[in-house]
Image (cartoon, rainbow, N blue to C red):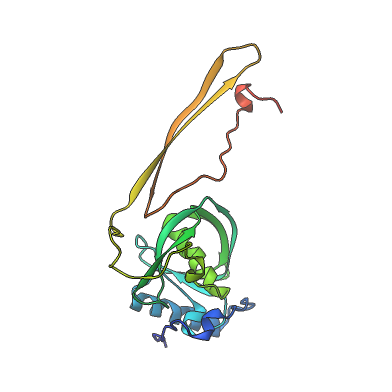
Amino acid sequence: MLSIKRIRVYPDPILRKKCRKVKNIDDKIIRIANDLKETMLAAGGVGLAANQIGELSRIITLHMPEEKKPLVLINPEIISKNGTRDVLEGCLSFPGYQGLVKRSVSVSARWLDLNKSLYKVTKEELFAQALEHEIDHLNGILYTDHLLEHEKLKQAGLQDGLNEDQPHSHDVDIKIIAHKEQGEPVEILESRLNFSKLYSDSSISQMRYELFNEGYLEN
């Protein structure tokens, strides 16, 4: 039978405990996962980790606004991260408060679902942010540990000039010019990338262009 659990709030010591890897997806794990989903949905959250309802198993749930059903992630793991951005973040274990933290622009991750199927994905924006936030919970890390220097938690809705419904965009102009030996410069690529982030300063940690096929670079 599904049940809505009490969400543990700071400074409950279980929030600082590291969750154990799930070795077998049995009836107990399925029950925890289902309770986690019901509790998250009842609280109107985007994500929830098992230790937030008092269970020390590496299970999280995520519910993106565009998705009808929440996801259950067993033993989620981030493989790689790309870029950084500043985001205003909250947590069900700190009800009513928000703080500015650094998160990745995109992450690559893997996990199992309740059917033991393996997923490997690359996600960005809210999904990447929520994934980092909830995996931090599994490791006993709270989002307050990531607060930017001199930043303090603020009561939600009281920030001057900040409104979560008003994203802003960054345009990045990119132009690549290559020189053939004893030749004139040739423009290979001109492009504009648009980033739409909530309160973010997006950065690209690495961009790689293959120019070998055009004969401008040699192996």
**Is the residue 51 above or below the residue 125 in the image?**
below
**Front residue of 69 and 96:** 96
**Front residue of 81 and 41:** 81
Q: What is the residue that sits farthest to the right in this orientation?
A: 219
Judge left or right: residue 38 versus residue 31: left
Can residue 182 be spotted in the picture? yes
- Residue 158 x, y percent position in the rendering: 28, 67
- Residue 16 x, y percent position in the rendering: 55, 79
Residue at 43 percent across and 49 percent down: it is 201
Can residue 30 be spotted in the picture? no
Say which quarter of the image contains residue 130. Answer: bottom left
Judge left or right: residue 169 versus residue 187: left
Residue at 49 percent across and 67 percent down: it is 133
**Front residue of 107 and 142:** 142
Judge left or right: residue 205 versus residue 174: right
Residue at 60 percent across and 23 percent down: it is 214
- Residue 36 x, y percent position in the rendering: 45, 79
**Is the residue 82 above or below the residue 212 in the image?**
below
**Is the residue 3 above or below the residue 89 in the image?**
below
- Residue 7 x, y percent position in the rendering: 42, 83
Residue at 50 percent across and 72 percent down: it is 142
Which image quarter is the N terminus in? bottom left
Judge left or right: residue 159 versus residue 23: left
The total number of labels drawn is: 0
Which image quarter is the C terminus in? top right
